[in-house]
Amino acid sequence: MSRDALLPLLAAHVLEHGLAGASLRPLAKAAGTSDRMLIYHFGSKDALVEALLAHVAAMYAQALDMAYPSEPAASRKDCAQRLLAIARAPMFAPFLRLWWEIVAGSAKGGKAFRASASAMMDSQLAWFEAHMPPDDPDPKGGARLVATLVEGALMFDALGLGDTAEAGLAALEG
């Protein structure tokens, strides 16, 4: 089995079970191969996790593309509200659980988590920038604002404080 054929199987496992305690044996079992074959294809466990998270990030971006409306957002607020509505959909829950696990690993000082989170966020920011309203005076800055709002709102949701997130978004102008 090739590296490219292994990644979707590994991604499905990690999206269901998370990364905590993800050792080579359970990952290999989920992919129908051996831990030695995973090392053969990826070189090391760290390289495997890096490739796996890059694959999951690409899956997330593709799902966002499919879910995002075709008409441009009217404002930054509209863009943030659209993205938040999409991210709150049940199909995105596994991605968000994994994302918070990566963020927590990064906050604990995990270099691999931080590198992966940084690469994933760079990709997200580029995606957000491409979806800013056509007349946005600063699409790069707008993307960062929208990302901050969406990430913050999703954090409030995770804490059971979705009403606080909604109040914050409602207070945003235009």
Image (tube, rainbow, N blue to C red):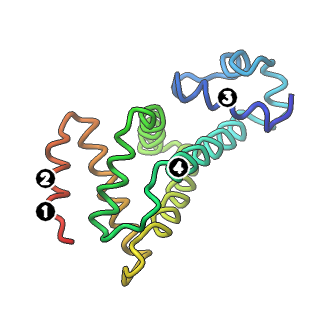
Place of residue 159 in the rendered image (x, y in percent of width and height, measured from the top left): 23, 35
Residue 66 numbered tag: 4
Q: Which residue is mark 3?
A: 10
Label 2: how many Cα within 10 Å (few below 14, some 14–19, many 20+): few
The reply to whether the C-beta atoms of the residues labelled 1 and 2 are less than 8 Å apart is yes
Helix, strand or loop for disc 2: helix
Q: Is residue 81 left or right of residue 15?
A: left
Q: Which residue is mark 2?
A: 167
Measure the alpha-carbon separation of dots 3 and 2.
Answer: 38 Å
Measure the alpha-carbon separation of dots 3 and 4.
Answer: 22 Å
Mark 3 / mark 4, whichever is N-terminal: 3
Place of residue 149 in the rendered image (x, y in percent of width and height, measured from the top left): 29, 58
Q: Which residue is mark 1?
A: 171
Mark 1 / mark 3, whichever is N-terminal: 3
Label 4: how many Cα within 10 Å (few below 14, some 14–19, many 20+): few
Amino acid on which disc 2 is placed: Ala
Q: Quadrant of the C terminus?
A: bottom left
Q: Quadrant of the N terminus?
A: top right
Q: Residue at 68% x, 38% y: name it.
A: 46
Name the front one of labels 3 and 4: 4
Measure the alpha-carbon separation of dots 1 and 3.
Answer: 41 Å
The residue closer to the viewer here, 106 or 101, is 101
Amino acid on which disc 4 is placed: Met
Name the front one of labels 2 and 4: 4
Q: Is residue 107 above or below residue 121?
A: above
